[in-house]
Amino acid sequence: MVRADPSLEAQALEILQRWDTAASIRSKPLHDEWKRIIAERDWKLALEESDRGQQLRQASPMMTLLPEQGRLDIIQSARTMRASKGPRSPWKMHYFVDTEFTDFIDCQLISLAIVGEDGTEFYGEVSDFELSACSEFVRAAVLPQLGQFPGRSMPAAQLRDELVAWLLAAPAKPKRVLCFDYQGDFDLVLDLLDAEIPTGWKCEHVGGRLDMERLETYFREHGGRHHALHDARANAFAFM
């Protein structure tokens, strides 16, 4: 992926220094740069200690899968919060996308998750990405969390076929909307699908509609940051 220009980086850094939330960022390129800087900051923090990877493996909440009831509780909590803010459009069903990938530069898909507002989920891991393309942080924080869902690791071609089948099987009404908070996630999904989103699906950038406090609340309670399925669940939980 191509990095943003220096002026965007400077603006994003200024926003971070002011502790503004993502909701205050109206420009999509600026929001993506803001997310990239946060991700790189997390990566640097994770690499400060040589044994960081081992610590992450020992502490990872994904070592134990989130129980089904826990997942349903998250969905119900999100619905209750939204109901208090007024009715949601009956014409759209939002599906939240998240991916993990090897590096910002040599970017290869590692895993992909989609979480619907109705609780439906899709998850898959790529078995044939190049391990040598992974950054140090990905090796420490992302790779140890893989393999938690038996049978969900497969070659990219098979993942594509299963994703297409899942997208086609989703109810046509209300209107299906793929939501992403980072342009790179959408680019990776589009690349996996050979630039062909199944008919009937729309796409929407929702980075400015995520409540950062709710996002952090999800991770404090359930962990799993930098695992695609948990990140997608967190976005569904934080969507306003």
Image (tube, rainbow, N blue to C red):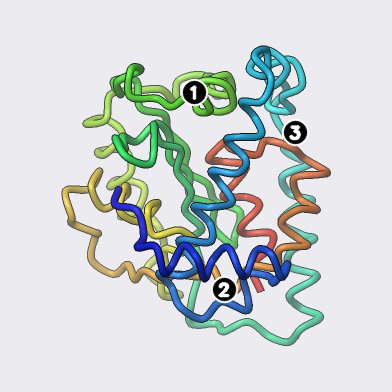
For disc 1, the marked residue is 136
Which sits earlier in the primary sequence, circle 1 or circle 3? Answer: 3
Work out whether 46 lies above or below 51: below
Residue 37 percent coordinates (x, y): 53, 52
What secondary structure is found at the residue carrying circle 1? helix
Work out whether 161 lies above or below 205: above
For disc 3, the marked residue is 67
Numbered circle sitting on residue 208: 2
Q: What is the distance, in whole Å, between disc 3 and disc 2 at their CAs?
A: 30 Å
Which sits earlier in the primary sequence, circle 1 or circle 2? Answer: 1
Tell me the amino acid under the disc marked 1. Answer: Glu
* Residue positioned 39% across, 35% down in the render: 103
Residue 180 in sight here:
no
Residue 159 in sight here:
yes
Q: What is the distance, in whole Å, between disc 1 and disc 3 at their CAs?
A: 30 Å
* Residue positioned 61% across, 25% down in the render: 47
Q: Which of 215 and 103 is in front in this view?
A: 103
